[in-house]
Amino acid sequence: MSYMAYKLEYKTYVLQHKHVFRISRAARTTTPVVLIRLKFNGVYGYGEASMPPLYGESHDTAIRFLQKVNLDDFNDPFDIDFIMQYIDKIDKGNTSIKAAIDMALNDIAAKLKNIPVYSYLKLPKVDTVITSKTIGIDNPEVIKKRVKAANEFKILKIKLGSNDDKLIINTVRKITDKPLYIDANQGWKNKNIALEMIKWLADKNVYLIEQPMPVDFLSELAWLKQRSPLPIIGDEGVQRLKDLENAEQFYHGINIKLVKSTGLTEGLKMLKLAKDKGLKTMIGCMAETSCSISAAFHLASQCDYVDLDGNLGIINNPYSGIKTKGGLLLNNEINGIGLINPEKEWQLINTY
Ligand code: MG
């Protein structure tokens, strides 16, 4: 039955950032990704694994994983759950490259039905979704420049967890009073100082605090959650569905990222379970091409907070897909995940 089997191709690629991107633990100017293409019954599906070095995946680990993938026995393109159970069991970890496969499977399934992925997932149609724009840790002159350049965005996400957090916020507030998301990326190590900081931020039009303390500071996170005047969102601390089991002890909400959740299939399960538990929901991203951003868009309408700007900070995005204008992601109603001309763009991608 080989004519109905999946065929898998991949290309290694390196995203070049417009600017040095700095968070509380690291700074970088490039992000390695693996781009994949699956073919089933003449239909192509596209996926991407974005792998910031911090999280342990790389071109090498992704290629090694893909070499173990054998989809020959799968012939129902609509039973993605079943295929992803197999993919997940191949090896532990590897969540980004698993997500790439899940994206491509969803792209194919929706294209076979001639509908966009949100519709395939039985989610309602929306025309636009507001996204925040992330500003990395930097000196006041650079922060000013970045805030001004992000003028069209209605919400900014500010990275903190530096030695100059109040200076950064004061610098932002000299230029704009628009709402802010704060992401400390585990940077605050003392619960009292963290609480004092959150209280200071609470009357500065801040909507939420992402991952204020390290993920293994569980008693401190539980203490902080009880007292925080702002919702605390778990990001590094909530990776997959199983992490939701007791997430409400430490967080008011969770940041779902396809690279953590192994894609749309488990990401949607996380979204639904989080809502059932009364948790706030956010969808986020890494530095990514328009492939991952377009895929994530299909869950965005269901989330309280959307942070899908990872394609805007890179200069060599090989794909065109869901576009951002005036701080809004614009639904393009294209079948599948929403890439506009992927067959041609795939041919132009030079592996490196
Ligand atoms: Mg985060």
Image (cartoon, rainbow, N blue to C red):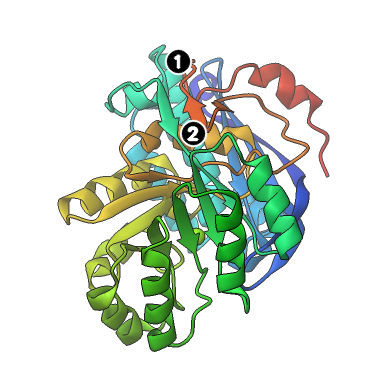
Does residue 297 lie above or below 158 as drawn? Answer: above
Q: Residue at x 55, y 42 (%)?
A: 100
Mark 1 is surrounded, within 10 Å at the Cα level, by few (under 14), some (14 to 19) or many (20 or more) other residues, namely some
Q: Nearer the viewer, residue 190 or 153?
A: 153
Does residue 34 lie above or below 328 as drawn? Answer: below
Residue 338 coordinates in the image, percent (x, y): 52, 22
Residue at disc 1, CB closer than 8 Å to ligand 1: no
Location of residue 48 by image quarter: top right
Check disc 1 and report its element: helix, strand or loop: loop
Does residue 60 lie above or below 102 as drawn? Answer: below
Residue 306 coordinates in the image, percent (x, y): 43, 43
Marked residue nearer the N-terminal end (2 or 1): 2
Q: Which mark is residue 53?
A: none
Q: CA distance from mark 2 to mark 1?
A: 12 Å
Q: Residue at x 33, y 32 (%)?
A: 79
Residue at disc 2, CB closer than 8 Å to ligand 1: no
Given the image, on which type of amino acid does mark 1 rest?
Glu
Image quarter in which the C terminus is found: top right
Check disc 2 and report its element: helix, strand or loop: helix
Q: Residue at x 49, y 17 (%)?
A: 332
Residue 72 seen in this snapshot: no
Q: Left or right: where does residue 69 sit relative to residue 12? A: left
Q: Left or right: where does residue 56 sit relative to residue 212? A: right
Location of residue 192 by image quarter: bottom left
Residue 135 coordinates in the image, percent (x, y): 62, 54
Q: Which mark is residue 295?
A: 2
* Mark 1 lies on residue: 333
Residue 158 coordinates in the image, percent (x, y): 55, 58
Given the image, on which type of amino acid does mark 2 rest?
Ala
Pointers 2 and 1 in contact (CB under 8 A)? Answer: no
Residue 300 seen in this snapshot: yes
Q: Nearer the viewer, residue 295 or 235?
A: 235
